[in-house]
Image: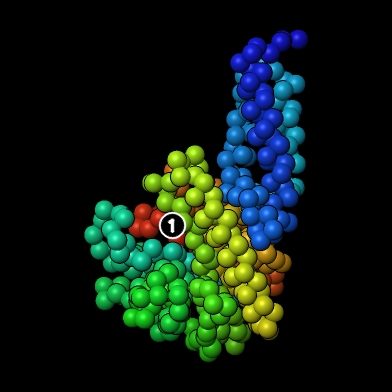
Amino acid sequence: MKKLSTFNKIIFLINTLFAISLVLSFFLPNFSPNQYGLIALLSLLVPGLIISNVFFVLYWIFSGFKKQLLQSFFILLLSLFFIPKLYKFNGTKNSKTKNSLSILSYNVRKFNKYEWIKMDSIEVKISNFITKENPDVILLQEYRNLKNFKLNYPYFSNPLMDNYSSPVENKKHKTNLAIYSKYPIINKGIVRHQKLSNFAMFADIVKNNDTLRIYNFHLASLGVVPDKEFFGHKDSEKLVKRLRKSFRVQQTQIDSLNAHLKKCNYKVILAGDLNNTAYSWAYKNTKNNLQDTFLEAGEGFGTSYKFKGFPLRIDFIFVDQKIKINTHKKYEIKYSDHYPISTTIAF
């Protein structure tokens, strides 16, 4: 039996730390951010932990140490039963029916208001993209009313939301959430949230005499700018404090959303920017008994947010158990720090 060199002993120690961290991640959805804010931070690292353990398995295979690879190998097997899939190999593509409905969700990042992306007329490019895709319902986060953003949809909801993103802009009714629909909106409103920022709106949409309630949400931002900050930054202590605070705000927002959902008698769809991963308390308590369209019909990593090449999926579409999911798609366009996602459902 080959003996481990000093170098490989160090590698195995690091491997063990990553393996233990991945095991801890199995239980993350059960830890309330209000009580365990620091532990909640680990949810952001789960994709990296999974990938790291895969690399450790490969390392030990090619190094000829079979015993050492078992640690990560068995934990990766367990992860298949305890946490949502990081990668989907085969997406489903079912044919549309007369009761099909296509929904697109997109955080448009204020249409590049502060020129984060060196590209002109982002709002025109986004409107052209949406027009080409032609979804039945569009949910936009960080939306602004701009003359150049033109969509030919008969029904539209863009409620004034106090303290969403920027209070000053909201007084001018500029930055908030929006829903466009090809089908009648018979009722609409916002999900009020204590004295903190309002974060969600809803619209009751009728198609073929059936009513769906569609929520468009945008949970509290974590305040992490990929080009400037990351774990290990010299101001990492401030970053961690900010993340913990954001997680706690998210918890109160989700509590408000769930209280609103309990009063709804229609089949529901929730879509938007969760600002958290599928391995978090936020995901578990927003999804509840709904279906995640990516897990049901998506493929690949499903990355929806650009973060230094890290596969972060923080934008979601959740649908009622009574609804059939035909497709889930992510679009590789670079007009925002998010990628748009869409689903086609039948009900």
Task: Give how far across and how far down residue 277 sits, in percent.
Answer: 58, 54
- Residue 115 position, x and y percent, is 28, 58
**In the image, residue 263 above or below residue 279:** below
Residue extending farthest to the left is 120
**Amino acid on which disc 1 is placed:** His
Q: Left or right? Give the position of 76 relative to 198.
A: right
Q: From the image, which quarter does the C terminus lie in?
A: bottom right
- Residue at horizontal 73 percent and vertical 30 percent from the top: 71
Please state, as top left, top right, bottom left or bottom right, where the N terminus lies in the image: top right
Q: Nearer the viewer, residue 300 or 65?
A: 65
Looking at the image, what colour scheme do you see? rainbow
Does residue 13 appear in the picture of this structure? yes
According to the picture, the residue beneath numbered tag 1 turns out to be 338
Q: In terms of depth relative to the viewer, which is nearer, 290 or 20?
A: 20
Direction from residue 62 to residue 135 in the image, left or right: left
277 vs 161: above or below: above
Q: Position of residue 96 (x, y in %)?
A: 55, 69
